[in-house]
Image: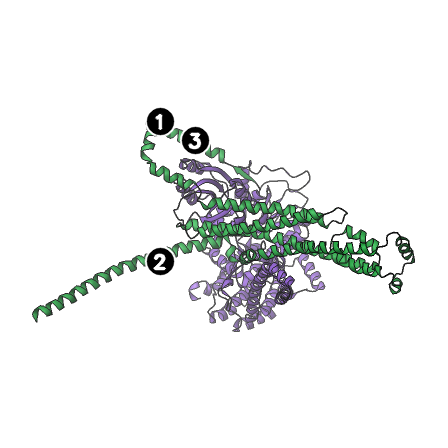
Chain colours: A purple, B green
């Protein structure tokens, strides 16, 4: 149950099958990202893959017949057409074709008819059709997947094939549960279920031993937990994503002042960077300590490097020089990233922000919180995006409160030229169940009340991380074996297993967050086997984009009182 | 890791397609053959064949790879030999030591050869005209260097570990003799047991034993039983002056041999330094953005795009240049005419 390993295995197999000799790898836009996330160029060079090219753009028309060509593409219409053109006038000696997903027979026929020179040696489906980020986190890089609160057709197709890819690469034939009441989740579950049944020969894995419950595919909807995507996060990976944006494990630092040229863009990959893989999930305080230790050991080494008196010292120096270089590269990179993070935190007063956010997310204390929000959003040092986030959280939390002060807050935001139209949009975006369960302040839930009480007695360990995402609670319920049939029914009429599943794949429509990845990681540390995926990985900014497109075309039902702010034009 | 095998299906479809084509085309087989022969002129065939063959430098690449693989096998041998040498036993090992030295030299020679080959391959980069090929060579060189680098690193580590262990053995024997200080016989035995470096310390104890027992040293011995043992052994195998001399000669001989050996290793390390320096530049790249496949593909693309733009610009320049050229000629002609006019009128 490690998605990075799964992708790597596929790639290695592809290269292995092509045999020895110089090879070129032909990819499309998406598979380029998929491969880049799993292997570095050095890894590929070791395997005699020396050239990399995209099938869809920027190709030279030189013929290099002595090269073997490994084609790894998604089976889309465009790609098939491009590949047939390539096969009609082959540039390379032989072709090994791998599709990242199930390809219709008619397309194979079309390709076969183009291959008149018989240069194709191998055709195979290899289901590496998703981007692996951490060992237990994958994404499909679909920035926005809904329109008027239902699937965009293209996004749905991509999601289905992505999930099928994950299931096949991990050899899992799961039972499927989906969030009751969410139309997108139900649609997706249905489609995945149908595909599994249609391709039952592919999914004919060894059934689990007697008594062992089958793995579970759990399809959730971001609309049930919009809060998690909005809160300021404090784990390293999540912070970097929130403040600097991680894209395919790459972080663009070109906007940061005083960054040396070679660090304008850095790679944060858990696979290649030890320091990063150890500290992905440590919070900002811990990270500060570890980076200090790292620098101390670096300094020690640097000092050692300096005193070269004897031949032995010289020898040692030459030996450790590459390591030293590598270490200094890592230190430099993380230092730049962390110093930028801490700069932004103090500049935007994120600690203060976060305290209030967490307070609103976890405790109900309307009047005091409203006062604090009012005070903060007018202050200059709070950036306009952060002010918007505060209002969004407030508006969702106290939507039905008798003295709801959203209008007043929005007016204040409008005075600062904020994007006020987002608040009514958000209120349309969140689902009914989020309303009833997350933000309900009137109905008293006995279980929740006692749990809160116990929590209150224990005291909060850290004010900035007290909020627990819905996903974690849900997973704990499932792993404890509690019945969730009502809220998360099976797609088929299967007899529900009484024992909790040991392997769970969670997929969140509308994007997962690194905070949830952290929750999954914590559970995995306890010995469970859970993988999290989403249409994309959100930070608050990309999430707001998602909200805007998702609610486009949807009627305003819940936010009539905010009519004045419905249009984007006044922003 | 599920996969689905489609090659059979593909070739089936391919065959049926070509069969159908043949079936429906009116030309008979022989006619078709004739046609093909006519259409594909000899030149084209030749060109195709030339394309199929890998370029001349590819042999060198294979060669280098072979050399590096030889290094790897030699490394295994060396490792085994080191282990054998460090194992304390009574077997005479000078042969092994010589062999080790030879092996070490061979490995560093091979690494040198591989390095030189890589440099030659690299130089091909500037002779080829094709951009793809240039990129290909660049990446091949990079890949080879990384492999070579790993080999060199393990080689160095191995040698270092060996030197270190010999050193610690030396220290260990030093400690051992310090505690025994004056017993010649045990020295002799352990001198055979462990290897030469023990003779360094051998001098000291023999000297003390030749001058007889030192009472103060005796005091150091806390164990009375052991003391008795010493007295029992001593008369049987007491060293005389002649033996001592013999030892000293042996000692220096072996010291020399040891020194030579160490020097050899150091020399090979020095030789490798140059190679090493070349290689270490590459390490920094690993783990940075330069090592990302997508980044490289993108940058090639943007370079291609930029190249196109440059080309267009150049073309534009070219055209404007021609215009300028015309203007220039015309103005020269006009000037000439004016001068002519003035001259004829005057």
**Label of residue A54 in the image:** none
The quadrant in which the N terminus of chain B is found is: top right
**Mark 2 crowd level (few <14, some 14–19, many ≥20, 10 Å Cα):** few
Visible in this render: residue A329? yes
Residue lying at 29% horizontally and 60% vertically, measured from the top left: B317
Asked which quadrant contains residue A196, the reply is: top right
CB contact under 8 Å: marks 1 and 2:
no
Against A406, residue B48 (above or below) is above
- In this orientation, which residue lies closer to the viewer: A342 or A550? A342
Residue under mark 1: which chain is it in? B
Residue lying at 38% horizontally and 57% vertically, measured from the top left: B306
Residue that mark 1 sits on: B29
Labels 1 and 2 positioned on one and the same chain: yes
The quadrant in which the C terminus of chain B is found is: bottom left
Locate residue A379, reporting x and y percent.
53, 73
**Mark 1 crowd level (few <14, some 14–19, many ≥20, 10 Å Cα):** few
Mark 2 lies on a secondary structure that is: helix
Locate residue A23, reporting x and y percent.
48, 44
Residue that mark 3 sits on: B15
Q: How far apart are marks 1 and 3 (CA)?
A: 16 Å
Residue that mark 2 sits on: B310
């Amino acid at each position: 149950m490690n998605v990075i390993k799964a992708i790597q295995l596929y790639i290695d197999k592809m290269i292995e099958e092509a045999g020895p000799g110089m090879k070129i790898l032909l990819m499309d836009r998406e598979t380029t990202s998929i491969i880049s996330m799993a292997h570095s160029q050095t890894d590929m060079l070791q395997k005699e893959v020396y050239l990399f090219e995209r099938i869809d753009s920027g190709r030279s028309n030189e013929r290099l017949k002595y090269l073997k060509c490994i084609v790894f593409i998604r089976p889309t219409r465009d790609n098939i057409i491009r590949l047939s053109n390539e096969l009609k006038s082959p540039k390379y000696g032989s072709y090994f074709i791998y599709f990242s997903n199930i390809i219709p027979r008619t397309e194979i026929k079309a390709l076969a008819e183009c291959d008149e020179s018989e240069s194709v040696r191998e055709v195979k489906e290899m289901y590496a059709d998703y981007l692996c980020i951490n060992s237990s986190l994958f994404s499909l890089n679909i920035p926005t997947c809904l329109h008027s609160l239902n699937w965009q057709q293209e996004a749905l197709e991509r999601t289905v094939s992505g999930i099928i890819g994950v299931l096949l690469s991990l050899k899992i034939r799961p039972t499927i549960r989906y969030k009751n009441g969410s139309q997108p989740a139900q649609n997706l579950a249905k489609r995945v279920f149908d595909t599994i049944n249609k391709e039952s020969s592919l999914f004919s894995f060894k059934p689990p031993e007697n008594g062992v419950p089958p793995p579970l595919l759990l399809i959730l909807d971001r609309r049930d937990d919009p809060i998690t995507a909005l809160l300021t996060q404090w784990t390293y990976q999540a912070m970097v994503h929130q403040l600097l944006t991680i894209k395919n494990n790459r972080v663009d630092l070109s906007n940061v002042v005083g960054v040396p040229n070679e660090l304008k863009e850095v790679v944060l990959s858990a696979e290649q960077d030890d320091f990063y893989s150890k500290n992905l999930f440590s919070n900002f305080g811990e990270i500060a300590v570890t980076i200090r230790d790292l620098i101390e050991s670096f300094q020690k080494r640097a000092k050692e490097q300096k005193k070269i008196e004897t031949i032995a010292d010289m020898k040692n120096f030459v030996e450790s020089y590459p390591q030293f270089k590598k270490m200094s590269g890592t230190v430099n990179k993380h230092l730049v990233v962390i110093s930028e993070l801490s700069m932004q935190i103090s500049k935007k007063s994120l600690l203060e922000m976060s305290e209030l956010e967490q307070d609103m997310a976890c405790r109900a204390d309307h009047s005091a919180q409203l006062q604090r929000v009012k005070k903060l959003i007018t202050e200059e040092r709070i950036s306009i995006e952060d002010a918007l986030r505060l209002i969004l959280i407030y508006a969702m939390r106290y939507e039905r409160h008798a003295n709801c002060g959203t209008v007043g807050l929005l007016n204040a935001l409008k005075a600062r030229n904020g994007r006020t139209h987002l608040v009514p949009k958000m209120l349309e975006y969140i689902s009914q169940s989020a309303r009833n369960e997350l933000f309900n302040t009137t109905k008293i839930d006995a279980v929740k009340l006692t749990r809160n009480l116990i929590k209150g007695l224990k005291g909060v360990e850290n004010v900035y991380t007290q909020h627990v995402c819905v996903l974690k609670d849900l997973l704990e319920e499932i792993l404890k074996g509690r019945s969730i049939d009502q809220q998360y029914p099976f797609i088929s009429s299967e007899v529900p297993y009484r024992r909790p599943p040991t392997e769970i794949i969670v997929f969140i429509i509308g994007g997962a967050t690194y905070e949830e990845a952290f929750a999954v990681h914590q559970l995995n540390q306890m010995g469970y086997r859970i993988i999290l995926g989403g249409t994309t990985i959100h930070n608050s900014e990309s999430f707001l984009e998602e909200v805007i497109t998702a609610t486009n075309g949807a009627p305003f039902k819940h936010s009539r009182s905010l009519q004045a702010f419905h249009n984007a034009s006044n922003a | 890791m599920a996969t689905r095998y489609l090659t059979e299906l593909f070739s089936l479809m391919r065959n049926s397609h070509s069969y159908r084509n043949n079936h429906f085309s009116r030309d008979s087989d022989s006619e078709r053959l004739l046609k093909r022969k006519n259409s594909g002129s000899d030149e084209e065939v030749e060109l195709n064949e030339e394309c199929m063959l890998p370029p001349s430098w590819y042999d060198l690449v294979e060669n280098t790879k072979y050399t590096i693989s030889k290094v790897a096998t030699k490394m295994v041998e060396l490792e085994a030999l080191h282990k054998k040498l460090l194992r304390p036993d009574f077997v005479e090992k000078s042969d092994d030591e010589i062999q080790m030295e030879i092996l070490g030299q061979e490995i560093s020679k091979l690494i040198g050869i591989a390095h030189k080959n890589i440099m030659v391959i690299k130089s091909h980069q500037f002779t080829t005209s094709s951009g793809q090929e240039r990129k290909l060579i660049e990446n091949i060189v990079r890949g080879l260097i990384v492999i070579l680098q790993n080999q060199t690193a393990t080689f160095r580590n191995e040698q270092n570990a060996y030197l270190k262990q010999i050193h610690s053995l030396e220290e260990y024997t030093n400690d051992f003799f310090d505690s025994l200080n004056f017993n010649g016989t045990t020295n002799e035995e352990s001198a055979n047991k462990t290897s030469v470096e023990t003779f360094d310390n051998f001098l000291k104890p023999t000297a003390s034993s030749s001058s007889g027992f030192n009472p103060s040293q005796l005091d150091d011995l806390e164990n009375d039983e052991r003391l008795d043992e010493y007295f029992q052994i001593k008369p049987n195998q007491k060293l005389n002056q002649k033996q001592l001399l013999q030892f000293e000669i042996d000692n220096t001989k072996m010291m020399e041999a040891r020194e030579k050996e160490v020097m050899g290793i150091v020399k090979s390390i020095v030789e490798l330094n140059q190679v090493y320096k070349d290689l270490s530049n590459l390490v920094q790249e690993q783990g940075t953005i330069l090592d990302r496949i997508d980044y490289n593909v993108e940058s090639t693309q943007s370079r291609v795009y930029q190249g196109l733009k440059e080309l267009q610009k150049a073309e534009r320049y070219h055209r404007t240049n021609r215009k300028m050229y015309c203007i220039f000629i015309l103005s020269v002609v006009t000037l000439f005419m004016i001068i002519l006019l003035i001259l004829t009128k005057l």
